[in-house]
Image (spheres, rainbow, N blue to C red):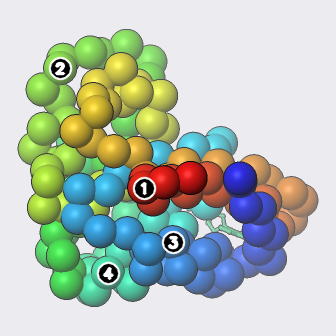
């Protein structure tokens, strides 16, 4: 069942990311979608803080992703440009989505064909502008297991 939260500013969206992060383990992958400025990077920043990453967290610009080391390994990918290129190099995500790392993917559509069964997509997050500083955040979390 999707859960829906409304936030009224970036700090609250970071808080949603932090709560999500507390449910994650190495090997998990989170797909984060939403329009430009919806708050994808903001939510991921909150998640990475919770995971112990101290460096500034911004969207990767010159590469498709960046790896961080917090209390666990963390990867942050932004596939915005790949969406338009339609690139499907099967090994593209391998450096980032490793078994020891928690992965977050912005603009994940281009990644979907590359995500095989070993890379479990644990959560899908979709952010929508709801006027001014409000955002609606829809989350589906699948921790696996029965039910
Ligand atoms: P995206 O990665 O989706 O393009 P960013 O997280 O980079 O979006 O940017 C979101 C922008 O919107 C930031 O400038 C942030 O301060 C602002 N903002 C305003 N209200 C919110 C909110 N409720 N949640 C997240 N960001 C917000
Ligand atoms: Mg972004």
The Cα atoms of the two marked residues, 2 and 4, are separated by 28 Å
N-term-proximal mark, 1 vs 4: 4
N-term-proximal mark, 2 vs 1: 2
Q: Which one is nearer the viewer's eye here, 25 or 41?
A: 25
Report crowding for label 1: few under 14, some 14 to 19, many 20 or more residues within 10 A (C-alpha).
few
The Cα atoms of the two marked residues, 4 and 3, are separated by 10 Å
N-term-proximal mark, 4 vs 3: 3
The Cα atoms of the two marked residues, 2 and 3, are separated by 28 Å
Q: Residue furthest front?
A: 146
**Label ID, residue 145:** 1
**Label ID, residue 51:** 4
Q: Which one is nearer the viewer's eye here, 32 or 86?
A: 32
User: What residue lies at 29% left-to-right and 16% top-to-bottom?
Assistant: 87
User: What residue lies at 28% left-to-right and 86% top-to-bottom?
Assistant: 52
Q: Which element carries disc 1, helix, strand or loop?
A: loop
**Label ID, residue 20:** 3
User: What residue lies at 20% left-to-right and 80% top-to-bottom?
Assistant: 70
**Label ID, residue 90:** 2
């Amino acid at each position: 069942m999707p859960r829906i939260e409304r936030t009224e500013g970036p700090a609250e969206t970071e808080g949603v990311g932090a709560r999500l992060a507390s449910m994650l383990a190495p090997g998990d992958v989170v797909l984060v979608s939403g329009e430009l400025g919806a708050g994808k990077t903001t939510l991921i920043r909150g998640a990475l803080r919770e995971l112990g990453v101290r460096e500034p967290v911004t969207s990767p610009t010159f590469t498709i992703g960046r790896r961080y080391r917090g209390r666990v390994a963390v990867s942050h990918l932004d596939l915005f440009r790949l969406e338009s290129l339609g690139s499907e190099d099967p090994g593209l995500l391998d450096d980032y989505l490793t078994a020891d790392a928690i992965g977050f993917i912005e603009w994940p559509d281009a990644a979907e064909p590359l995500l095989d069964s070993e890379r479990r997509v644990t959560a899908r997050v979709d952010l929508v502008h709801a006027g001014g500083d409000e955002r609606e955040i829809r989350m589906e979390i699948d921790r696996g297991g029965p039910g």
